[in-house]
Amino acid sequence: MHKNLALLGNKAWLLSAVGSDFYGQSLLTQTNQSGVYVDKCLIVPGENTSSYLSLLDNTGEMLVAINDMNISNAITAEYLAQHGEFIQRAKVIVADCNISEEALAWILDNAANVPVFVDPVSAWKCVKVRDRLNQIHTLKPNRLKRKP
């Protein structure tokens, strides 16, 4: 998403946490080379960068996935508050439900008039925003996440 916004000529920033490993450095380098600013990213010493692997069927629907998203816990409400003024000046905010419910709540409560787009990422994690749908401009669930 960030890369596509940058390719369209928009200024885009990534606020995320990466490990101090090869993958974190590679992600920051490649993301920055695509035109996305990464200066607000949190580099967590001694931690691994998130990883995700999914298997899709022939229609593109996910069959199964495994991940290690523990570093997402480093994106706290306190970390976001340190960048609060910057976040409130954004034209749009894109978040996913890999971060904590408290961090998502901070974003939704402090976005001011900035539209917030949320990807629930999984049926299990979408409950984090269930009671805050009125604060979300756009929600992007897949078919499994839409089931009651």
Image (cartoon, rainbow, N blue to C red):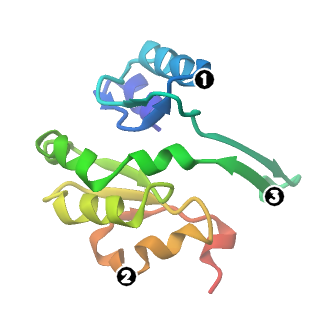
Mark number displayed over residue 97: none
Of mark 2 and mark 1, the one earlier in the sequence is 1
**Neighbour tally class for label 1: few under 14, some 14-19, many 20 plus, Cα within 10 Å:** some
The residue where tag 2 is placed is 131
Name the one closer to the observer, 123 or 6. Answer: 123
The amino acid type found where label 3 is placed reads: Val
**Neighbour tally class for label 2: few under 14, some 14-19, many 20 plus, Cα within 10 Å:** few
Of mark 3 and mark 2, the one earlier in the sequence is 3
The residue depicted at 41 percent of the width and 45 percent of the height is 74
Give x and y (percent) for residue 45.
46, 27
Q: CA distance from mark 3 to mark 2?
A: 27 Å
Give x and y (percent) for residue 8.
38, 27
User: Position of 12 compared to 143: left or right?
Assistant: left
The answer to whether residue 137 is visible is no
The amino acid type found where label 1 is placed reads: Tyr
The answer to whether residue 122 is visible is yes
Tell me how many marks there are: 3
The residue depicted at 27 percent of the width and 71 percent of the height is 135
Furthest toward the right, the residue is: 58
Q: In terms of image quadrants, where is residue 11?
A: top left
Mark number displayed over residue 64: 3
Q: Are marks 1 and 3 in contact (CB under 8 Å)?
A: no
Of mark 1 and mark 3, the one earlier in the sequence is 1
Mark number displayed over residue 23: 1
